[in-house]
Amino acid sequence: MATGSDSVTIHNVAKVAGVSISTVSRVVNDLGRVAPSTRRRVEMAVRRLNFHPNSRAQALSRKRTDTIGLIVPDFDGQYFSMLMEGAHEKARANGMHIMVLKAKGTEAKIEAVTHLCSGGRTDGVILMLSEMYNEVLEGVGNINQPLVVLDQDVNLWRLDNILIDNKLGAFEATRHFIAAHEVSDLFFVGGSENNVDTTERALGFADAIRPMGLDAEGRQFFGDSYSYDEGYRLASERVFPLIAPGQRYGVVAGNDDVACGVIDALMDKGIEVPQQVGVIGFDDSYIAVHRRLKITTMHIPTKEIGRVAVRMILDRLSGRAAEPTKVVLKARLIVRESCGCGK
Amino acid sequence: MATGSDSVTIHNVAKVAGVSISTVSRVVNDLGRVAPSTRRRVEMAVRRLNFHPNSRAQALSRKRTDTIGLIVPDFDGQYFSMLMEGAHEKARANGMHIMVLKAKGTEAKIEAVTHLCSGGRTDGVILMLSEMYNEVLEGVGNINQPLVVLDQDVNLWRLDNILIDNKLGAFEATRHFIAAHEVSDLFFVGGSENNVDTTERALGFADAIRPMGLDAEGRQFFGDSYSYDEGYRLASERVFPLIAPGQRYGVVAGNDDVACGVIDALMDKGIEVPQQVGVIGFDDSYIAVHRRLKITTMHIPTKEIGRVAVRMILDRLSGRAAEPTKVVLKARLIVRESCGCGK
DNA sequence: ACTGCCAATAAAAACCTTTTTACAACTTTC
DNA sequence: GAAAGTTGTAAAAAGGTTTTTATTGGCAGT
């Protein structure tokens, strides 16, 4: 059906319709006044020639690419998928596209942002930042495009910013053990102590157990990373020795991977999970519902992060937003089985 | 450090260096002959002004965007992440970018391809196709860009094509039960019977059990979809009644999700997995190693698919490739615990 | 009937490169 | 020492839009 062979330009349409190219442009973009009869003739020509405006020329002329850059440290995991989902949805709904770049480490991130912004490859950039944000943002320097930073509080930099309230999330997870299960003691098993998420979550945990007269000291265990193996190791070596028979305990894990490791380690040691020790994870990742024991976890509204990030860029592009905005999203407790509820 | 305020053009550089813009272009792109002294002056000016060629203008002039479109039906799951990983890696290594589009359903896919190709938003497109490929490819019509189709054999369409040998994969999985475990009977639990992957895998399964004198009839069970719940249901209702005590069985599942469902269902019925019934999954997804019983599964080289897809587009763009190419990649058995090995 | 205004459209400028063509100023070559 | 080739650079064209400015014809007001 389509006539193949590309490159039918606005000039061709103009010639066929017997008008000037500016008239074609006005018809196609639906602006300015055009006589109904002229409009009809142009539309006819557009259809007949199967004209599609050359987006490269449009980009040059309009000084924008209708593209938003999304820079992430990694493609795997629930987080990226959901972020992508939200960002893509919002972007497409506004005629924009998403260009994805992976950048791990400070240097790579600086390079990625610069690469996208400098030549005007994008109209705005969403940057997922983990540690070392100061170095990255310094390296990026004055950017000429809207930049939204995810996951790190970059207050000082006067940038749009989206955060998850990790502290509150961990607080609520811990509170669930205290309020809904009669635990006598609680533990936090995290990822790396250098990871900001972990430290915030640990803080929320500490806040929640304090009213019980418990001190965080000796109840928080950190490892190398957010991983199944670290969870397994920490639970075997640190948590297990503290479990006394006849008592009920709660473990708040740094994320779902760690939670899985913790559960399996305790089970391997002969502890009954969740009857004797309940476990709550973090992130509500895919694995939380794909195990025999469904994991109670804190859901992070990652899709919403993606949506909001794109909205922020759109707002800034359209001049709607004036001041840098910080949006803090709440994590939500999803009660399943591993805490001891239900089953 | 960067002077902010964008829009320093090649003209500015030319003026500062005291040369013409064509000379600047030749220096920046490192082509043609330029006197060493001139080169030095230009490079100096470039650095001083912090000049970055406007990529929009480049795109218009060069008639390419250095962007490859990646159209997928879904963002979640291992498959997308790994595909992205491979495609991004190969693309960036060749100065190209990846623009991601989600399109579910025939109409949406046609629209996505057309949208990307027609206005020259991309230089080539990778299209992940599930069912109904004829409708999609017909709707797309004559395209003016390299198009690589994944996962569906589109031989007739004279397009570049990447496939996984599902039949062989299932054959090997089944053979493993026969060769390494002394099973007396085997079952295949798949997703939907309309899914091409499923039917191919079922075929491989049938081929493998035939030499044992077993017939596929009554040994293959299909459900609505590739899901945990379907696996659980089919295992409870169809497989479990066929299990006799004292015998050893093997189940080849349509994918890892289904495998998980099968395992949990059988365990819930009191069957010993993997001692009495071994299970092998498909896809080597994340969940395969994040359960208590590690799942033996067929690894699909998804990252490689991404790499090869980009390479194909690059080859076609550079005119290296002449004829449409079909690449068939093999799935690989990853032996873990659920088949009965190891543990 | 003339000025002034408005609607509809055309013409031209701008966007910023890359690439082709043109042109000097030197080197060779015979 | 003139014709032919080389080298380094400038000028101009091309790429396809959008947007601004100009132009035309028709019509109302006086």
Image (cartoon, coloured by chain):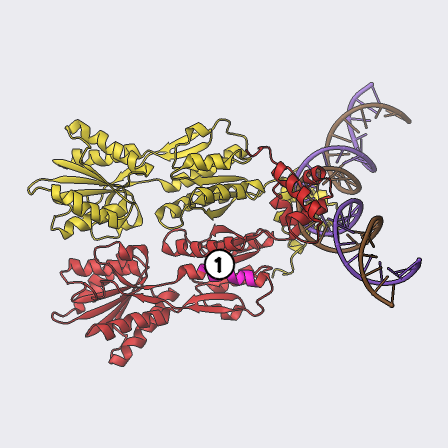
Chain colours: A yellow, B red, C brown, D purple
Estimate the x, y position of residue B145 in percent, counting from the top left.
Answer: 58, 59
Instruction: Give the amino acid at mark 1.
Output: Leu
Q: Based on the displayed image, in which of its 4 quarters is residue A319 positioned?
A: top right
- Whether residue A315 is visible: yes
Q: Residue at x 14, y 28 (%)?
A: A213
Tell which of A32 and B285 is nearer to you.
B285
Q: Residue at x 28, y 32 (%)?
A: A168
The reply to whether the magenta stretch includes residue B307 is yes
Give the extent of the magenta segment: B306-315
The mark total stands at 1
Q: Secondary structure at mark 1?
A: strand
Q: Chain of mark 1?
A: B
Image quadrant holding the N terminus of chain A, namely: bottom right
Q: Based on the displayed image, in which of its 4 quarters is residue A328 positioned?
A: top left
Q: Residue furthest left?
A: A246
Task: Bin the neighbour count of mark 1 within 10 Å (Cα to Cα): few under 14, some 14-19, many 20 and up.
Answer: many
Q: Is residue B154 above or below residue D8?
A: below
Q: Main secondary structure of the magenta part?
A: helix
Q: Based on the displayed image, in which of its 4 quarters is residue B131 positioned?
A: bottom left
Describe residue B245's horizontal placement relative to residue B50 as left or right.
Answer: left
Estimate the x, y position of residue A199 in percent, counting from the top left.
Answer: 29, 35
Can you identify the residue that label 1 sits on?
B127
Tell which of B268 and B311 is nearer to you.
B311
Estimate the x, y position of residue B31 in percent, counting from the top left.
Answer: 67, 53
Q: Is residue B91 above or below residue A86?
A: below
Describe residue B328's horizontal placement relative to residue B340 as left or right.
Answer: right
- Whether residue A340 is visible: no
Q: Residue at x 16, y 68 (%)?
A: B243
Q: Residue at x 13, y 60 (%)?
A: B270
